[in-house]
Structures are given as structure tokens and as C-alpha cells.
Amino acid sequence: MTHRYPAFDDVIHGLADHLRYLKEQGLDSLRITRKPLIDPSSSDMDTLKETPVISAPSVASPAHEELKRSTLTESDHVPDIEADRAYEFERAVTGVATNGTNDDRELRLAELRNYIGECRRCPLHLQRTRLVFGEGNPAARLMLVGEGPGSEEDRTGRPFIGKAGQLLDRIIAAMGLDRKDVFIGNVVKCRPPGNRDPEPDEIAVCRAFLDAQIDIIRPQILLALGKISGRVLTGIPDATLASLRGVFYQYRQIDLRVTYHPAALLRNPAYRRPVWEDIQTIMARLGLPVPPVKS
Ligand code: SF4
């Protein structure tokens, strides 16, 4: 199914792109006025017809210089909000934080959350109650990635807190860890209506935020929970969950493992054994004591 973005968003994004282009060309402020730039009834229209069109000049042309002169004043400075937010995103991901170090992951996650805002970048915003950013230890060695929020998560804004989340808590406890030791996120941050799978175009938009979280946290291991998350992170479309299990992959230069989603485990207890095998493998890779296998 293909979704259409709301027309208003198209206009805003188009305007933001155009402002970015003008900024690249050296324009650093714009005059805001209610007066039309060109009065259709005036002789300005004739002037306009004679003025060459300015189309992405690589160097400032005389027409561009004229445009700058006619629009710049010291007192008319308007902050470039889109550029400021892009800067926040860049700073959050690259770690050029206010203290100039890469250490403050918590601050950088907060900057990323601030950048995402009340996101309307994909159609999933239309029916969500709350955006679920993810939570946990900003310096976690293990990061768990589900596919998207369910109804409880949508209501509360927290990841994995329904029945599947309670089972996940028990799995984490079986590793000798606590929820606050790991970071839990999702491929998409808003609930797909009716718990359907997220659409490829929704994933394509939202995964930039997941990638940014991964780049900030830099866990030792990523654990994809379920088929959708496994397919997205391994880059193997249409793979079955069973075929994705059993090996380590690399995602953004981090070890990645795939296992069943806790919700699938609730539906089918036969998945308990393979999940426990996956968890034991991860524990060994993290250097955690692995309990002996009961015979
Ligand atoms: S799913 Fe992601 S991209 Fe879509 S609205 Fe929510 S936060 Fe934005």
C-alpha cells in the first residue's frame, strides 16, 4: 500500500529545501512582509519578464547578488529553524556535543529526541497517540530492536511494556541483567494501526532515527526481535525468521543477532528453546556467565 503525504507537509518540506538552497548560496536572512513581491498590475511584471531566471548558480551571479542586496537587512534576521534542527540532529549523531566530547550519550539522545519532535514525517503519525522513542541505558552494551509500538506502548509512550514486554523483561533478567542495563527501541516509533506490519516507505523514513540511536549508543550487540526488525537490520527482505537465526551479522559495524519476537514466543512456546539458545550465544559474546545446559 502506498501512502500519500499530506500536502501541507510537502509545502513545508519544499520550502525548507528552498531555504537551505538559498542559504548555501550565501543568503543569511530574509525580509518578511505582507506586501506581494510583485504587483501583477505594475510595471514590475515587465521587469520580471526581462530578468533572467536564477537557477542553482554554482557561483553568485549578478542577479543573485542583486537578490541578496534587495532582501538583506541587519534588523530583519529570521532564524533558519529547519537548519537549526538539522544541526541538532547532526550534533546528536556525530557527538559534537556542547562539551566537545563523544561521551555524553544521554545528552545526544535527548538532542535526537528533540530533533524528532512530534514527528509527522510518515503517515504513521496520523493514528498514533504517543511516539515511542525508546528507553534504557544510553551506554548499553546490548540494544534490543523490535518492529514498532503496540497498543500499550502507544498509550504510554514506552517500548515493550505489554505482555510481550513483560516476557522480554524476564528474558533480560535470565541474562542477569535489568531493563535499565539495556536499550530498547523499535524500527518505527509510531504504532502501525491495528498492529499491522510497518510499510516499507514508513520504515524507510523512520529508520534514520533508529540508525542515529545506534550510532550514539554504539552497543556491543544488537538483537533484532522478530521478522520485520530482522529483515530490516540484516537487509535480507522476505527472509523467514528461522532462516535469519543462528549467525552473527554486522549492522553499522556492530554484531547483530536475530531471534523470535516475545509476542511470537507467547503464541508458540516451542520457540522457547531457540530463543534461549540465541540468548546464551549473546551472553557468551558479552562475557556474561552462561548457566550450564540442563540435561
Ligand atoms: S513512525 Fe517515525 S517517521 Fe513516522 S511519524 Fe513516527 S517518528 Fe516520524
Image (tube, rainbow, N blue to C red):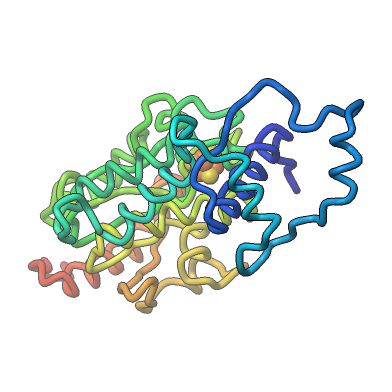
Q: Residue furthest top?
A: 34
- Left/right of residue 68 with respect to residue 210 in the rendered view: right
Give above or below for 54 relative to 192.
below
Specify whether 231 is left or right of 146.
right
Residue 95 is situated, as x and y percent measured from the top left of the image, at 25, 59
Q: Residue at x 16, y 49 (%)?
A: 173
Q: Position of residue 210 (x, y in %)?
A: 41, 54
Q: Nearer the viewer, residue 94 or 123?
A: 94
Is any part of residue 76 visible from this angle? yes
- Name the quadrant of the C terminus: bottom left
Q: Residue at x 26, y 49 (%)?
A: 108
Q: Nearer the viewer, residue 138 or 262?
A: 138
Residue at left offset 12%, top offset 68%? 290
In the displayed structure, 155 sits above or below 105; it is above
Decide which of 213, 67 is in the foreground and name it: 67
Q: Position of residue 151 (x, y in %)?
A: 47, 30
